[in-house]
C-alpha cells in the first residue's frame, strides 16, 4: 500500500512541476490528495462503519419545516368570512371572499395557510403582537388604522347600511337613530360612526350575527353594518328585516388587507395577488359565488 501511495504522490508532484499553477488545480486533484493522505491506514471495515454513521446522522436529521402564513379574521361576516355549512369550506371549515384571497396569497408564497378566528376589534393587536401575519376581515382602510398597520391596495368598495324590522318606518335616515338602541359589531366602521356621529345608545357585539339576533329579538331598534353583510342577513330574513340607506350620512369606504409595518415583501405579494385577481375577474366571480351562487351560506 505504501508503495502505491508513493507512486501516486510522485506522479502528482510531476504533474505540478510540469506547469500546473495553483489556479489550474481542480477540486478533483485536491480531493485526490486528501484521499491519498487518509488511506494510509485504510481497511474495508472503516468504510462500513463510516457509512453506517453517516446513514444514522441522515436518518435523525429533521426535515425542513414548510412555511406557514397565518390569516387573522372574524369568521362571522358573510360573504367575506364565515363557517361553511357542513364544515366544508374554501379552507377547512372557513369560507368566503377573504378566505379565497388568503388561499391565493398562501399559494403565491408557497406556504401553508392557517386561519386564526377571533373578535374583530382585537385583530390589530394580534397582528402587532405577531400571532398572525395579516388581517383579511373586510377591514376598512381608515386613517386611524393606518397609524398602526399598513394596508394593501383596496379590493372591495362598501358603504354602511341600517337594518330595521320590516314594519318599522320610523327610521329613514341616520339622524333617526338618535336616542335609539343601535347594535353594531365592535371595532367596525359602523361602531365608530354611531359612537362618534350620533347621540344613540350603542351596543357593540363581538359577532355580526349577535347584533342581528338582538334586532330580531327586539332588544335593539337597528343594526348599522357594512352593506354586503346587511344584504346577506336581510336576504336570510326577508319577512322580518329591511334595509335603510342614507348615502349622505354614510360615505364610501374600501376594504384592504392589513400587515405589520416593515413587512414590505409580504405586502408586495398581497398587492400582486389582489391586482391579478381583479384583472382576471376572479374577485367579481367570487363575490357572486359567495353571495348568490352555490358558495353562499344556506339560509
Image (cartoon, helix red, strand yellow):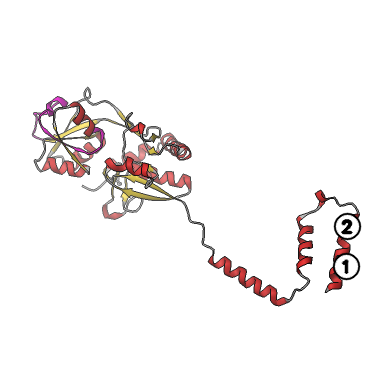
User: Which residue is at 20% across, 44% downward?
Assistant: 209
In this rendered view, identify the residue nearer to me: 204 or 97: 204
State whether residue 7 appears in this view.
Answer: yes
Look at the image and tell me in which quarter the N terminus lies.
Answer: bottom right
Q: Is residue 90 above or below residue 291?
A: below
Q: Which mark is residue 236?
A: none
In this rendered view, identify the residue nearer to me: 55 or 9: 9
Q: How many numbered marks does the figure carry?
A: 2
Cα–Cα span, label 1 and label 2? 12 Å
Residue 97 image point, x, y percent:
34, 42
Q: Residues within 10 Å of mark 1 (few under 14, many from 20)?
A: few
Tell me, yes or no, whether the highlighted magenta stretch contains residue 180. yes
State whether residue 292 appears in this view.
Answer: no
In the picture provided, is 176 more to the left or to the right than 156? left
Element assignment for label 1: helix
The boundaries of the magenta stretch are 166-190
Which residue is denoted by mark 2 in the rendering?
15
Disc on the earlier residue, 1 or 2: 1
Which residue is denoted by mark 1 in the rendering?
7
Residue 157 image point, x, y percent:
32, 31
Q: Quadrant of residue 153?
A: top left
Residue 78 image point, x, y percent:
27, 42
Q: Residues within 10 Å of mark 2 (few under 14, many from 20)?
A: few
Tell me, yes or no, whether the highlighted magenta stretch contains residue 101. no
User: Which residue is at 13% across, 29% downward?
Assistant: 177
Q: Is residue 53 above or below residue 250?
A: below
Element assignment for label 2: helix
In the picture provided, is 60 more to the left or to the right than 242? right
User: Which residue is at 38% across, 51% downward?
Assistant: 114
Residue 101 image point, x, y percent:
38, 42
Amino acid at each position: 500500500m505504501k508503495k502505491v501511495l508513493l507512486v501516486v504522490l510522485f506522479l502528482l508532484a510531476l504533474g505540478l512541476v510540469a506547469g500546473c499553477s495553483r489556479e489550474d488545480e481542480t477540486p478533483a486533484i485536491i480531493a485526490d490528495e486528501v484521499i491519498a493522505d487518509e488511506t494510509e491506514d485504510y481497511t474495508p471495515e472503516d468504510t462500513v462503519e463510516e457509512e453506517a454513521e453517516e446513514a444514522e446522522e441522515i436518518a435523525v436529521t429533521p426535515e425542513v419545516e414548510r412555511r406557514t402564513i397565518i390569516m387573522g379574521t372574524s369568521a362571522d361576516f358573510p360573504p367575506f368570512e364565515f363557517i361553511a355549512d357542513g364544515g366544508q369550506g374554501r379552507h377547512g371549515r372557513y369560507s368566503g371572499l377573504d378566505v379565497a384571497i388568503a388561499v391565493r396569497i398562501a399559494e403565491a408564497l408557497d406556504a401553508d395557510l392557517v386561519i386564526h378566528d377571533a373578535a374583530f376589534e382585537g385583530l390589530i393587536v394580534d397582528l402587532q403582537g405577531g400571532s398572525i401575519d395579516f388581517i383579511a376581515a373586510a377591514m376598512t382602510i381608515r386613517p386611524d388604522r393606518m397609524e398602526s398597520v399598513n394596508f394593501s391596495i383596496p379590493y372591495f368598495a362598501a358603504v354602511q347600511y341600517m337594518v330595521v324590522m320590516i314594519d318599522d318606518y320610523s327610521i329613514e335616515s341616520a339622524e333617526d337613530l338618535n336616542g335609539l338602541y343601535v347594535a353594531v359589531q365592535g371595532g367596525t366602521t359602523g361602531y365608530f360612526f354611531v359612537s362618534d356621529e350620533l347621540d344613540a345608545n350603542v351596543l357593540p357585539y363581538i359577532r355580526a350575527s349577535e347584533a342581528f339576533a338582538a334586532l330580531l329579538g327586539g332588544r335593539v331598534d337597528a343594526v348599522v353594518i357594512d352593506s354586503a353583510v346587511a344584504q346577506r342577513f336581510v336576504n336570510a330574513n326577508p319577512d322580518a328585516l329591511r334595509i335603510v340607506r342614507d348615502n349622505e350620512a354614510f360615505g364610501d369606504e374600501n376594504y384592504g388587507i392589513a400587515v405589520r409595518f416593515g413587512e414590505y415583501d409580504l405586502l408586495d405579494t398581497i398587492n400582486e395577488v389582489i391586482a391579478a385577481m381583479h384583472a382576471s375577474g376572479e374577485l367579481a366571480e367570487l363575490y357572486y359565488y359567495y353571495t348568490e351562487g352555490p358558495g353562499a351560506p344556506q339560509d
